[in-house]
Image (cartoon, rainbow, N blue to C red):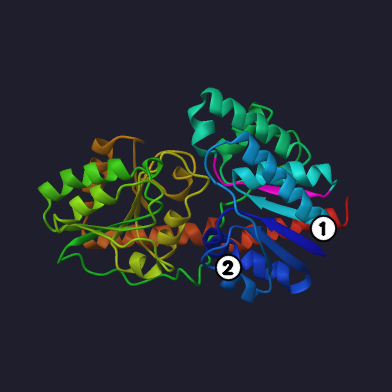
Amino acid sequence: MKIVVLANFAMGLYKFRKELIEELCKDNEVYIVLPDGEFIEELKKIGCKFIPFEFNRRGINPIADFNQIIRYKKILKSLKPDVVLSYTIKPNVYGGIASSSLKIPYIANVTGLGTSIENGGLLGFISTTLYKIGLKKASCVFFQNENNKKLFEDKKIVSGKTRLIPGSGVNLSNHNLEEYESDAEGIRFLFIGRIMKDKGIGELLDAFDVISAKYPNVSLDIVGGCDEDYSAVLEEKAESGFITYHGQQKQVHEFIKNSHCTVLPSYHEGLANVLLESASTGRPVIASRVPGCIETFDEGITGFGCEVKSYESLAKAMEKFIVLSLDEKKQMGLNGRKKVEKEFDRSIVIDAYIDEINNIKKPI
């Protein structure tokens, strides 16, 4: 069977879908179509065949976007795949349009709503309309949280088969349970994610100003590439000695292992992988109470929630964590690991994909 995977970012495809790609490569010919970059070589070593495909992940340019459909269609017409798998908005929409025009079965994965749909307005209307067209003939649309699934169904963006999966799941071996270190010499908070407004980086920095003024034994490590220009702000904050910016990293497990708590005050998520990976490692989490985050923790048991876009609420949640005893922090981390083992094992996601691909191979 020939399978084509359309995505927008090699690092995300490798880190969150490597095990699925490995499974697909066992008995199938798998092509990945996405922009060149880090982790392409790692994906090729798994057994994929790589077709470079550059495009702007953000914004809507009618000419460029129409050209993206034409280029997808040209590739798919040449490869003649049995099924197409797509991830994120533009591959879902434009890959879906190209696949349906060629009568190729395709499975889309809605990894999050994106800012345009969240904020509404003209851009939200355009995005919603494009999604309706792109997903119209999908064999199945996977959703990573119930809220997104319901919104797409209520707005009639999808009308065919849908399935809810636990995000990208977690590789429990890669993110194994690690010993929880003493906090006697200080409490280390960790943020992992793209450095951008919608990840709540502004609220996090403001909240940490409040926390570090009251608790001088705390520190904050920030890991991730800058999608928006926060360089000057991060440099200024680093001068305080409490904050360290590490830039984008290939591997984040050691950062999680060396932390006491992961913080993600995001505005919206499909399902936050970093929170799942942190919980899998045995680390409590603090996150905004939004779909895509709330599913990953149990309030007061595996972590704490805060109100979205509120640095005051975030600071209160961080303080709640700080005043816990070391044993309470450890237990919260152990509870998180148990939750991930039960609800978010990556094998659940792989099984769902194999099931849907088999349905296409042998229609019921």
Q: Is residue 196 left or right of residue 153?
A: left
State the image quarter where residue 204 is shown.
Answer: top left
Query: Does residue 96 appear to the left or right of 334 in the view shown?
Result: right
Residue 45 is tagged as: none
Query: What stretch of residues is rendered in magenta?
Result: 104-112
User: Residue 361 colored magenta?
Assistant: no
Query: In front: mark 2 or mark 1?
Result: 1
Whichever of labels 2 and 1 marks the residue nearer the N terminus, that label is 2
Q: Which residue is mark 2?
A: 40
* Residue nearer the viewer, 59 or 121: 59
Camera-nearest residue between 252 and 246: 246
Residue at numbered disc 1: 78
At label 2, which amino acid type do we have? Ile
Q: State if disc 1 and disc 2 touch (CB < 8 Å).
A: no
When the figure is inspected, residue 123 is found, relative to residue 74, above or below; the finding is: above
Label 2: state its secondary structure.
Answer: helix
User: Horizontal and vertical percent for residue 12?
Assistant: 53, 59
Number of other residues with Cα within 10 Å of mark 1, as a class: few under 14, some 14 to 19, many 20 or more: few
Identify the residue shown where x is 12% and y is 52%: 215
Left or right for 236, reference 8: left
Residue 273 point in image, percent of width and height: 48, 55
Mark 1 belongs to which amino acid?
Ser
Residue drawn at point x = 59 percent, y = 36 percent: 61
Q: Position of residue 241 (x, y in %)?
A: 15, 59
Q: Can residue 142 be seen?
A: no
